[in-house]
Image (cartoon, helix red, strand yellow):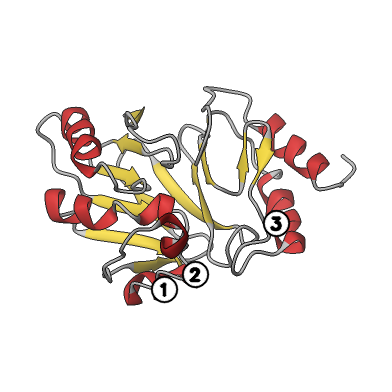
Amino acid sequence: MAIEQVDLAQLFDSNIYLVSGDRTVLIDSGIGFQWEDINASVRKMLNGRKLDILILTHRHYDHVGGANAIIKEFGPSEVYTGKGDAEPLRKGDRASTLGERFGGALEPMDVKELGEGDIIDIGGHRLRAIATPGHTIGSICLFDEVTGALFSGDTVFVGGIGRCDLPTGNADQLIDSLKKLNTLKINGFYPGHGPAVPKGGNVHITNGLRMMGVRI
């Protein structure tokens, strides 16, 4: 089993992670403006294996803009996102996904919904979906019950938290989501932007709560 990070070509791309067990999962797709480079990096890491699943942590274009290129290239049999963010992706909604702000097109895509507690078991990793609204209404984090790794999307970063002033964002919901994450025993911490860390992930959750004015 392994967690690897895709090499990125654009500074405003989201982080993209490949999680490999008996099956493979790609978490987020980047903005897709240089999709050939991203796909080449994914292909190299797959090393001849099939991409089985693509999970999008939330609707924003810097995380989903490259999804259709990945789907066309690798043909994952399952594509998921959080319940509250699925419909804009199905419709190719450029407004609430921020595609208009980034200046990119968004083709409608067929996505399934992940709800609170849903498990993606790929053998060696058991990714449990955690509903974490706040950055968007449908934001999800993924907690690996085997390794203790948390894939936090744009809910919380090393030294930062997700914005709440974009469509469907909500500060009170973000605080509640951070409190929920703080009940986990987090080892590796893999956010949607910025550096990932191999251990001690809980400190970044508590730092996020402090940034939101919550006393810990």
**Marks 2 and 1, how far apart in space?**
7 Å
Residue 205, x across and y down, in percent:
70, 39
Front disc: 1 or 3: 1
Work out which quarter of the rendered image holds the N terminus and state it: top left
Pick the front one: 48 or 167: 167
Residue pictured at 28% horizontal, 71% vertical = 108
- Three-letter code for the amino acid on which mark 1 is drawn: Pro
Residue contact between numbered discs 2 and 1, judged by CB atoms under 8 Å: yes
- Mark closest to the chain's N terminus, 1 or 3: 1
Residue 53 against residue 195 in the figure, above or below: below
Residue pictured at 65% horizontal, 52% vertical = 163
- Mark closest to the chain's N terminus, 2 or 3: 2
Front disc: 2 or 1: 2
Q: Which mark is residue 145?
A: none
Residue pictured at 36% horizontal, 48% vertical = 31
| Residue topped by disc 3 | 174
Q: Residues within 10 Å of mark 1 (few under 14, many from 20)?
A: some
Secondary structure category for the residue under label 2: loop
| Residue topped by disc 1 | 88
